Image (cartoon, grey):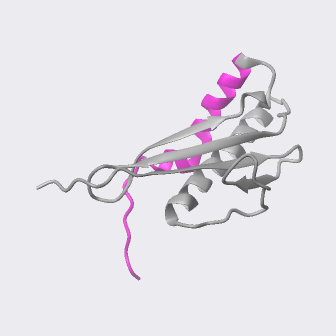
């Protein structure tokens, strides 16, 4: 017997990278950003982790091409799966397109950032939890 769960979404949350490469966190673009995220649930923690990983990976991808990024933000949201076990069905991640003027290079950097991001890569794997 399959148990159906009530659909639920989380986010969006925003991870902003400033001109010095520092990360800032907010739940709206109009909100004052914080040096550390306000974690209200494990779900929100995971969204901030994914956004941070994409932002840092994008910065790494740009550095490998020897280009400098303009300040930008990453927006992350998710939807919960409709059945058990409790998990996310999907994640939606978008990056502010103004981080670089060259749109073709921007697309290339996004592909590279996704391949570098350990959080997004790990989300496709099984997690084993044990006590020691």
102 vs 116, left or right, is: right
Q: Position of residue 92 (x, y in %)?
A: 52, 39
122 vs 14, left or right, is: left
Q: Residue at x 73, y 64 (%)?
A: 36
Question: The N terminus appears in which quarter of the rendering?
Answer: bottom left
Q: Position of residue 68 (x, y in %)?
A: 86, 33
Question: The C terminus appears in which quarter of the rendering?
Answer: bottom left
126 vs 94, left or right, is: left
**Region of the chain picked out in magenta, as a range:** 104-132
**Residue located farthest toward the front when viewing the structure as drawn:** 30
Q: How many marks?
A: 0
48 vs 64, left or right, is: left
Residue 77 drawn above or below residue 95: below
**Residue located farthest toward the bottom when viewing the structure as drawn:** 132
- As rendered, which of 56 and 76 lies closer to the eye? 76
Q: Residue at x 42, y 46 (%)?
A: 124
Q: Position of residue 35 (x, y in %)?
A: 79, 62
Residue 121 drawn above or below residue 24: above
- As rendered, which of 25 and 105 lies closer to the eye? 25
Q: Residue at x 83, y 30 (%)?
A: 66
**Residue 73 lies in magenta, yes or no?**
no
Give the main secondary structure, helix, strand or loop, of the magenta stretch: helix
Q: Residue at x 60, y 29 (%)?
A: 111
**Residue located farthest toward the left when viewing the structure as drawn:** 1
**Residue 122 lies in magenta, yes or no?**
yes
Q: Position of residue 54 (x, y in %)?
A: 64, 43
């Amino acid at each position: 017997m399959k148990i159906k769960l009530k659909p639920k979404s989380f986010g969006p949350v925003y991870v902003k990278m400033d001109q010095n490469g520092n990360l800032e966190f907010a739940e709206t673009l109009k909100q004052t950003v914080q040096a550390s995220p306000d974690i209200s649930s494990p779900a929100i923690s995971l969204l901030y982790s994914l956004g941070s990983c994409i932002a840092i990976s994008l910065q790494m991808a740009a550095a490998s091409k020897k280009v400098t990024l303009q300040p930008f933000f990453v927006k992350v949201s998710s939807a919960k799966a409709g059945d058990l076990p409790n998990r996310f069905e999907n994640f939606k991640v978008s990056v502010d397109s103004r981080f670089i003027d060259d749109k073709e290079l921007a697309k290339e950097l996004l592909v590279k950032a996704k391949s570098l991001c350990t959080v997004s890569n790990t989300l496709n794997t099984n997690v084993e939890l044990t006590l020691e």
